[in-house]
Amino acid sequence: AAASVLLTRQEGAVRTLTLNRPAALNAFTTQLLAQLRLALDEAANDASVRAVVITGAGRAFSAGQDLSDPLIKPEFGEGKPAKDIGHLLDHYYIPLALRARSMPVPVICAVNGVAAGAGANFALGCDLVIAGQSASFIQAFSKIGLVPDCGGTWLLTRLVGRARALQLALLGDKLAAADAHAMGLIARVVPDEDLAATAQATALKLASMPTRALVETRRAFDEAMELNYEDALKLEAVMQSQLGFAHDYQEGCSAFLEKRAPQFKDR
Ligand code: T3D
């Protein structure tokens, strides 16, 4: 039987999803995009999962859209077949990006090699991006006549500012992991041989923490980017009010005062 294009495993409360089309540098076919979204749905709906790690098999994280994938909605112009990329985004990339960004648990992307096009931007949308030292990021879109998608326009401008976002997106040059880290695009760079263990240890640590508060932190940061200062302060108050009645806050305080390790369980 053909190997699955997405591998799933779980260690403790950490679910790891591995893109598995190494011969094509884990380029996204509609099949892989659908399976990744389904796997995230399953992780979201499984109470035993408290953190997710996404990584790639082989020497790449993902080369982005598989440019040889069969047309998903053929249209014909000037006598030759064309594909409606907007349709591809509407039905595959947008639901996937929204699914990842709204996971009820933290999502770590372990970037093990090149991340190009939608592969780069899918990674950058995750909560923590940890890269191996030989990893790289390429906004490949301009080279084939497209704009950054899979959240690139929103993510890049916010992560590194307009000037550097445009430099990356217009030139489409390969950005080394160390440079991506230095400009604030990603959280951390580690030696290649330490990547999997670092991602796993970070995920296990997050999985032992107050999951609901972590996820509300992500949501607060995303919403705050669209709010003025006073409205951000008020959103913090609404969230604190809700979290303050939850189990994990009581447990966190009790454990601190009793000088013992907390047992968090909200999700
Ligand atoms: O449909 C649409 O267009 C919608 C678009 C949606 C969003 C996007 O993601 S657009 C961006 C798409 N991605 C790219 O343009 C990147 C294309 N790939 C590359 O530029 C290079 O492969 C890399 C810089 C990523 C890596 O270069 P290198 O030299 O390390 O590897 P390689 O030799 O180019 O690739 C190895 C194999 O993977 C090769 O196959 P082969 O010759 O061994 O049979 C290559 O064709 C294949 N591959 C790499 N990227 C893709 C791919 N096959 C299909 N689609 C790819 N994107």
Image (cartoon, rainbow, N blue to C red):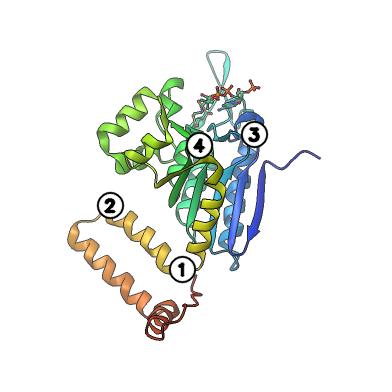
**234, above or below 199, in the image:** below
Disc 1 secondary structure class: loop
Identify the residue position indicated by label 2 in the image.
225
Q: Which quarter of the figure is the N terminus placed in?
A: top right
Identify the residue position indicated by label 3 in the image.
22
**93, above or below 256, in the image:** above
Of callouts 4 and 3, which one flags the residue occurring earlier in the amino acid sequence? 3
Q: Residues within 10 Å of mark 3 (few under 14, many from 20)?
A: some
Ligand 1 resides in the quarter of the picture at top right
Q: Residues within 10 Å of mark 4 (few under 14, many from 20)?
A: many
Quadrant of the image occupied by residue 173: top left
Identify the residue position indicated by label 4 in the image.
119
Is label 4 within 8 A of ligand 1 (CB to nearest ligand atom)? yes
Q: CA distance from mark 4 to mark 3?
A: 13 Å
Q: Amino acid at mark 1?
A: Met
Q: CA distance from mark 2 to mark 3?
A: 36 Å
Of callouts 1 and 4, which one flags the residue occurring earlier in the amino acid sequence? 4
Q: CA distance from mark 1 to mark 3?
A: 33 Å
